[in-house]
Structures are given as structure tokens and as C-alpha cells.
Image (tube, helix red, strand yellow):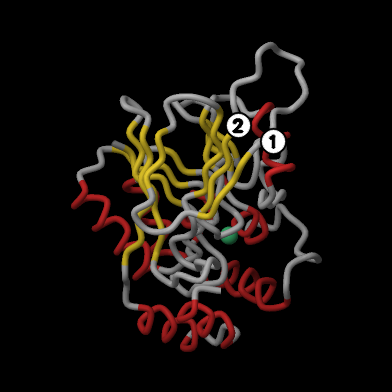
């Protein structure tokens, strides 16, 4: 049993709640799909937990921006301000850890990408047409992505032979408790976001994966949003970044 999660975004109360919940469920592995920092006020605490506990951890676009390895001109002003704040307020070992990560990891039973199989850093996969093209190029039958902060999944039948047209993909958003039988076909699955959900459910998101039976279960867990919001305000980060946590948008 593995817990798969993404987009922690320096939200320590949310990350702690997910780790607690995953432990209660009884997982024995943790895969993080990136964006450990950015937006929130606890980059050091979140990176420390990720470093200690994850078995795989990717780097995301916000992490790369903090390392000055990605141009922030397309970031919103609040996101860019958070990137600047994070770069100035993180310990050197926090940045060192992020610098050692890659945006994709295909060494496990399922392939992991921060954003998408064909563009691990930037592409937001939100539509079935897009997902169909991703499903044929992904390195494993089942892959996981983060980045959009929306808990959703896409699936398609296995192509009859290599070089066939991309199969038609179907996709849905997934609420708490949704369970997927993923033992057949191709799957592209987003667990949602730990620290800044944008699918209307403000609870922290993670996904439970069983690679023996190939089942995946979506989880949401309540956390102390007040504490995360107060930390953002105390840090002098844009107020909007605190407010959006309460509505999950
Ligand atoms: Zn993100």
C-alpha cells in the first residue's frame, strides 16, 4: 500500500494531517509528485518531512522557480511573490534537497510525473483529448500526475498494437472515497493537492494505491486551515493565498 500525493505547497498542517491519515490506513510507502514549496509559509518544515518520509519525491514547477531554475513570468503575481519569499526564507538544506530532485520518476511500478507524461513540468492535464495523447506516451500502464490541484483520473483501453491512434480517453473528477479498479487498461491519475486544493473540497487530498490488486482509493482529510492561513498572513504573503484555502479554490 502506497500513499500518493502532490502539491503540498509549504502547508505544514495539511501535510501532517495527510501523513497521519496515511499511517492510520497503514501504507508502507509514500510518493510525492512535487511542488513541496511555494504559496505556503512552511517550506522548511514540509521539506524536512518529505525528506524524512517519502520513498520517491519529484520536483515541481514552483520548487524549480524557487531554485531560480524556471522563469516565473507566467506565474500569477501572488505565486511569484511566494516564490521570492520562499527563496529568501528557506534554509540552505531545504533548497539543497529540492535541487537534487527530478520532475519525473519511472523507476517504480507506476510512473510518476509532476505535471504530465510528455511535459513533466508544465502541462496541465484537464481534458480527455489531452489525456489520450499522454496515456500512449507514459512510461508505465498506470501513471500519476499532480500540478492541477484537482483530484481526477483518465483511462483508456490498451491499444491493440503500437503506433495505433491514441485511444479515446474518458475522465472524471474524483471525490473522497472514490475507488478505482485499475488492473486493466491505461490510467493517468491525479490524487489532488495536499496543501492548496482547487476542486472545491478544501480538505487535504491523497490517494491510496495497492499495486498488488491494482486498486486506488481517493482520500480527503480535514486539517487546521486556520493555522495554515495565519502562518501565511504572519509571513506577509499575499492574503489571497490564505483565503483560498478555506474554499478549496
Ligand atoms: Zn502546485
Label total for image: 2
Q: Nearer the viewer, residue 138 or 45?
A: 138
Nearer the N terminus, badge 2 or badge 1?
A: 1
Q: Residue at 53% of width from left, 80% of height from top? A: 244
* Residue 140 location (% of width, % of height): 55, 25
Q: Please tell me whether residue 178 is drawn above or below residue 199 in the rendered image.
A: above
What residue do we see at 39% from left, 69% from top? 203
Which is nearer the eye, 88 or 239?
Answer: 239
Q: Identify the residue at the far top of this view.
A: 161
Would residue 99 be found to the left or right of residue 201 on screen? Answer: right
Location of residue 164 by image quarter: top right
Query: Residue at left 28%, top 36%?
Result: 1
Residue 7 appears at what percent x and percent y?
A: 51, 58
- Asked if the residues shown at circle 2 and circle 1 are in contact, with their CB atoms under 8 angstroms apart, the answer is yes
Q: Which residue is mark 2?
A: 156
Distance between the alpha carbons at the discs numbered 2 and 1? 7 Å
Disc number for residue 51: none
Position of residue 223 measured from the top left corner of the image (x, y, whole percent): 32, 72
Q: Quadrant of residue 3?
A: top left
Amino acid at each position: 500500500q502506497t500513499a500518493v500525493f502532490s502539491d503540498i505547497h509549504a502547508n505544514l498542517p495539511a501535510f501532517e494531517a495527510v501523513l497521519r491519515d496515511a499511517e492510520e490506513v497503514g501504507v508502507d510507502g509514500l510518493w510525492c509528485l512535487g511542488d513541496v514549496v511555494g504559496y505556503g509559509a512552511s517550506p522548511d518544515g514540509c521539506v524536512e518531512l518529505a525528506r524524512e518520509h517519502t520513498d520517491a519525491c519529484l520536483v515541481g514547477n514552483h520548487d524549480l522557480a524557487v531554485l531560480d531554475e524556471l522563469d516565473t513570468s507566467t506565474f500569477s503575481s501572488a505565486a511569484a511573490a511566494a516564490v521570492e519569499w520562499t527563496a529568501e526564507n528557506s534554509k540552505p538544506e531545504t533548497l539543497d534537497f529540492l535541487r537534487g530532485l527530478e520532475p519525473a520518476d519511472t523507476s517504480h511500478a507506476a510512473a510518476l510525473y509532476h505535471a504530465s507524461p510528455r511535459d513533466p513540468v508544465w502541462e496541465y492535464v484537464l481534458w480527455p483529448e489531452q489525456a489520450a495523447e499522454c496515456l500512449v506516451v507514459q512510461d508505465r500502464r498506470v501513471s500519476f500526475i499532480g500540478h492541477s490541484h484537482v483530484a481526477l483520473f483518465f483511462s483508456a483501453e490498451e491499444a491493440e498494437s503500437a503506433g495505433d491512434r491514441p485511444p479515446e480517453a474518458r475522465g472524471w473528477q474524483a471525490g473522497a472515497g472514490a475507488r478505482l479498479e485499475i488492473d486493466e487498461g491505461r490510467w493517468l491519475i491525479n490524487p489532488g493537492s495536499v496543501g492548496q486544493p482547487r476542486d472545491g473540497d478544501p480538505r487535504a487530498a491523497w490517494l491510496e494505491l495497492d499495486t498488488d490488486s491494482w486498486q486506488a482509493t481517493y482520500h480527503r482529510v480535514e486539517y487546521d486551515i486556520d493555522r495554515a492561513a495565519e502562518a501565511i498572513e504572519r509571513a506577509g504573503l499575499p492574503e489571497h493565498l490564505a483565503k483560498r484555502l478555506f474554499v478549496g479554490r
